[in-house]
């Protein structure tokens, strides 16, 4: 079957951050003729074109997939295909209109592609097309983005995983910076001594050219094998010269962009309160990694900084009642305190945030803090509030009113359970930033990295002023702070295109010791003179950069403010997205291939979606693929299924089904889980969870809890957290965490009754031998999906899944994640496997039936 699959499919996967390179799975009947990535950077604005050409050498039609990963901050500006010398170009539409056209196409048997979130900084575009015998197809994807300066450099990272040697493979980057290029570095994690000389760099004062183009022979691991040496990250880093405090201004065709990052400024002392979630959900790696990051961050404090630490669960723990100076002795005391951080209790986000605000406000009133210093809160949580104030908009309102524009709030959302959009908006409302910290081995580095970005403030309340009669349509020209190693970018339009490109610019800000003020005449160089051989490519880049920044800022404004302000920002962002042909969260791009002789046509959709999180009951999350599989097991009420069995660690989880009270007229009986048995033999733990109560046996002691209780039980081998919203968290020592949800139904409902949901956190901590209906997927499953076609319902297309040597008919549908909304749940897209998961699960569903709630067989 594997060989047959390769004869049917060729996958072109392009991974990128700034640049991209295709990842190819070869078919003996499909020849990949060329793969090129061409990136042109004009004053930090990157224009990237990815092209891949493939030839179907078979005597019958073949399906070819084109999959691209691109930065989430980038906007696709074009997707087109050339088939048999005929070009099909994408058309941008408002998202709802494009979606209707897409659904109509799918219901008519046409194929389609989507962009969706797929990782920390990337999103995935995927499309397939059926190519006739001896025909050639060329895929062309173009996107644009503003490169952001972080920690003193711009970075272009390319994830290179082609799997097989690629013919005519090339990455090219041309960087044009009129300020002058300070340095350029290009390297790869996979570069051997043989491949390193193939990275070519040509650098002049204002231009850099980087290329990497290994031949198929140079890519091979050995002369006679198909494996490739190219597997890792290809990275370009550079910075520009910083000559003046005024910054650099570029003017092209009536639009200007102002880059501001003055050199050699002293840092502003900071007053920082670290607010850290220590609720039970932080147990394990999260609390360990947070502790490690905090220890490193504390040692990076400057002696003129002031700091304090607040820990919170359902209680608020103040290390000190006030901020103290970061002297060596005080930092040493804080390190000792940080090493002792342990987890317990629930999550009171509102109380913790207000405690930090009140501490800073009081210290300001008491003149404890230096007058010229920067007040900031770094707030980290991994969960949802379930103690104190729990209504998210009310928490945001409380924090905003307490801060009153005087403090910057930086929010870190750890893991997938946290409501990141809530933290993002709360940070934006309070002069700060938010960042998601992904649960991975490098979480400590992620935490430290974010702190490093915001730790050193150079200027506060930065204002840019331009003549009203000269400049209009300005992007944001007021900024709360300028961080060391970053850059502020302002863009606008000149009122008079015939002016001599000279106008007065003023910048005002608060510095470390005195107010910062600089003014000067904006003068620009002639791009046609500096780059005469390339002048044709720069025509409208400043206008497009202005549009890019404006749309990004409007999208942020659409999340904050009044309903009217949100609506106006959304409408303006949509208008500009359509005008400048940007695929944004408000627009989609549709490519339609005209009908063939048999009456069929293809339609493709380039879309940009928001992030989706979750690991709902009977859905198998596959985070590395940013996808999910789901299936149902239908059986008679009372059947007991093994869900998780790990003989190495001694963990067993079984679930017993219950049915409706009675069958509704014309319906069938539905089954749910109504009882779970959980055992950890090594730890001596045993739980029985029903819709009525929870029975716990640990170390020979038995405890019985009702769902109406609110309790936190801490033991040597297991912690239990039972919240008022019907969530039971079972945290096993040095192992996984299980979450059981109680779904309550109206007591007098004629048919339905209460039932339970089951989730697993940190499943990677289980051994490779783990099995069961759910356990068998905890370490992933390999599959591919192709042949997208209409299903019974237009918005739920069918497809063919190649998994475990079989071809399965699957449907694109959804199931609900109830972790953050126990009442309504959130729809999560997944590939639905029919017939009780047949073909996906090992064996048959009946193989997982056991004789008792705590039995293995």
Image (cartoon, rainbow, N blue to C red):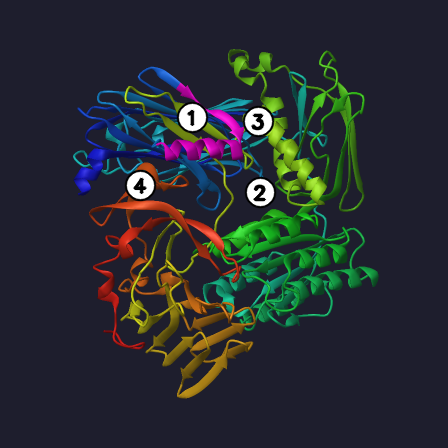
Tell me if label 2 and label 3 are in contact, CB under 8 Å. no
Q: Position of residue 680 (x, y in %)?
A: 35, 76
Residue neighbourhood size for the residue with mark 4, other residues' Cα within 10 Å, grouped as few (<14), some (14–19), many (≥20) = many
Tell me if label 4 and label 1 are in contact, CB under 8 Å. no
Determine the CA span between mark 3 and mark 1.
Answer: 15 Å
| Lateral position of residue 134 relative to residue 427, left or right | left
Of residue 487 and residue 677, the one placed in the foreground of this image is: 677
Residue range highlighted in magenta: 88-108
Quadrant location of residue 491?
top right
Residue hosting label 3: 578
Residue hosting label 2: 151
Residue hosting label 4: 799
Quadrant location of residue 764?
bottom left
Q: Element at badge 4?
A: strand
Question: What residue appears at the point 61 percent right and 41 percent down from the top-left corner?
Answer: 485
Residue neighbourhood size for the residue with mark 2, other residues' Cα within 10 Å, grouped as few (<14), some (14–19), many (≥20) = some
Query: On residue 591, which mark appears?
Result: 1
Of residue 237 and residue 702, the one placed in the foreground of this image is: 702
């Amino acid at each position: 079957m594997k060989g047959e699959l390769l004869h049917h499919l060729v996958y072109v996967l392009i991974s990128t951050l700034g640049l991209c390179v295709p990842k190819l799975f070869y078919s003996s009947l499909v020849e990949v003729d060329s793969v090129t990535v061409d990136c042109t950077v004009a004053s930090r604005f990157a224009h990237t074109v990815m092209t891949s050409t493939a030839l179907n050498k078979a005597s019958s039609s073949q399906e070819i997939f084109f999959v691209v990963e691109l930065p989430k901050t980038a906007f696709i500006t074009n997707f087109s295909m050339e088939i048999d010398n005929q070009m099909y170009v994408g058309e941008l539409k408002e998202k709802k209109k494009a979606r209707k056209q897409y659904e109509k196409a799918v219901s008519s048997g046409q194929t389609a592609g989507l962009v969706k979130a797929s990782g920390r900084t990337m999103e995935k575009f995927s499309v397939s097309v059926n190519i006739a015998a001896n025909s050639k197809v060329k895929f062309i994807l173009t996107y644009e983005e503003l490169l952001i300066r972080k920690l003193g450099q711009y970075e272009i990272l390319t994830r290179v995983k082609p799997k097989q040697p690629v013919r005519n493979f090339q990455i090219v980057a041309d960087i044009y910076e009129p300020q002058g290029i300070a340095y350029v570095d290009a390297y790869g994690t996979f570069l051997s001594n043989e491949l390193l000389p193939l990275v070519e760099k040509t650098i002049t004062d204002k231009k850099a050219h980087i290329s990497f183009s290994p031949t198929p022979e140079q890519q091979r691991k050995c002369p006679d094998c198909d494996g490739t040496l190219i597997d890792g990250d290809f990275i370009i880093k550079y910075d520009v010269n910083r000559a003046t405090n005024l910054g650099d201004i570029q003017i092209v065709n009536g639009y200007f962009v102002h880059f501001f990052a003055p050199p050699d400024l002293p840092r502003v002392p900071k007053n920082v309160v670290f607010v850290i979630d220590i609720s039970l959900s932080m147990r394990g790696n999260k609390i360990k990694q947070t502790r490690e990051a905090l220890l490193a961050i504390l040692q990076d404090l400057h002696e003129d900084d002031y700091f304090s630490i607040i820990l919170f669960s359902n209680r608020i723990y103040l290390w000190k009642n006030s901020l103290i100076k970061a002297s060596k002795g005080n930092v040493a005391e804080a390190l000792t305190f940080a090493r002792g951080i342990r987890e317990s209790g629930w999550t009171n986000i509102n109380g913790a945030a207000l405690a930090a605000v009140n501490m800073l406000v009081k210290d300001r009133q008491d003149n404890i803090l230096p007058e010229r210093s920067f007040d900031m809160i770094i707030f980290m949580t991994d969960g949802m509030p379930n103690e104190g104030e729990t209504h998210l908009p009310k928490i945001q309102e409380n924090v905003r009113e307490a801060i009153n524009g005087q403090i910057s709030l930086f929010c870190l959302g750890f893991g997938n359970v946290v409501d990141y959009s809530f933290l993002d908006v709360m940070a934006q409302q309070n002069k700060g930033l938010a960042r998601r910290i992904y649960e991975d081995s490098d979480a400590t580095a992620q935490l430290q990295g974010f702190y490093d970005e915001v730790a050193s403030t150079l200027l506060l309340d930065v204002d840019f002023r331009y003549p009203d009669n000269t400049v209009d349509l300005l992007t944001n020209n007021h900024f709360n702070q300028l961080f060391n190693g970053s850059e502020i970018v302002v863009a606008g339009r000149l009122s008079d295109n015939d002016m001599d490109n000279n106008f007065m610019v003023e910048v005002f800000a608060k510095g470390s010791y005195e107010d910062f003020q600089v003014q000067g005449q904006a003068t620009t160089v002639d791009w046609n003179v500096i780059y005469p051989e390339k002048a044709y490519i720069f025509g409208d880049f400043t206008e497009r950069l202005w549009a890019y920044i404006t749309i990004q800022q409007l999208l942020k404004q659409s999340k904050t403010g009044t309903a009217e302000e949100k609506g106006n920002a959304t409408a303006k962002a949509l208008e500009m997205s359509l005008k400048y042909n940007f695929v944004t969260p408000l627009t989609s791009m549709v490519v339609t291939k005209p009908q063939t002789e048999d009456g069929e046509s293809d339609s493709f959709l380039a879309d940009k979606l928001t992030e989706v999180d979750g690991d709902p009951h009977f859905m198998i999350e596959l985070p590395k693929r940013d996808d999910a599989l789901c299936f149902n097991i239908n059986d008679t009420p009372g059947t007991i299924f093994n869900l998780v069995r790990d003989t190495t660690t001694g963990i067993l989880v079984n679930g017993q089904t219950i049915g409706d009270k009675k069958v509704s007229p014309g319906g069938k009986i539905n089954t749910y889980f109504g009882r779970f048995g959980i055992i950890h033999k090594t730890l001596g733990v045993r739980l029985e969870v029903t819709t009525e109560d929870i029975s716990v046996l640990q170390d020979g002691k038995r405890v019985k809890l009702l769902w109406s209780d609110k309790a936190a039980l801490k033991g040597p081998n297991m912690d239990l957290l039972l919240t008022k919203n019907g969530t039971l968290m079972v945290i096993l020592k040095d192992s996984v965490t299980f979450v059981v949800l109680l779904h309550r139904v109206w007591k007098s409902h004629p048919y339905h009754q209460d039932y339970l949901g089951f989730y697993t956190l940190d499943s990677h901590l289980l051994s490779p031998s783990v099995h069961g209906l759910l356990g068998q997927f905890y370490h992933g499953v390999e599959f591919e999906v192709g042949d997208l076609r209409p299903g019974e319902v237009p918005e739920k297309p069918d497809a063919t899944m190649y998994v475990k040597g079989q071809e399965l008919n699957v449907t694109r549908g959804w199931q609900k994640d109830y972790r953050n909304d126990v009442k309504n749940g959130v729809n999560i897209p997944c590939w639905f496997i029919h017939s009780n998961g047949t073909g996906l699960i090992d064996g048959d569903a009946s193989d997982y039936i056991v004789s008792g709630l705590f039995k293995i067989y």
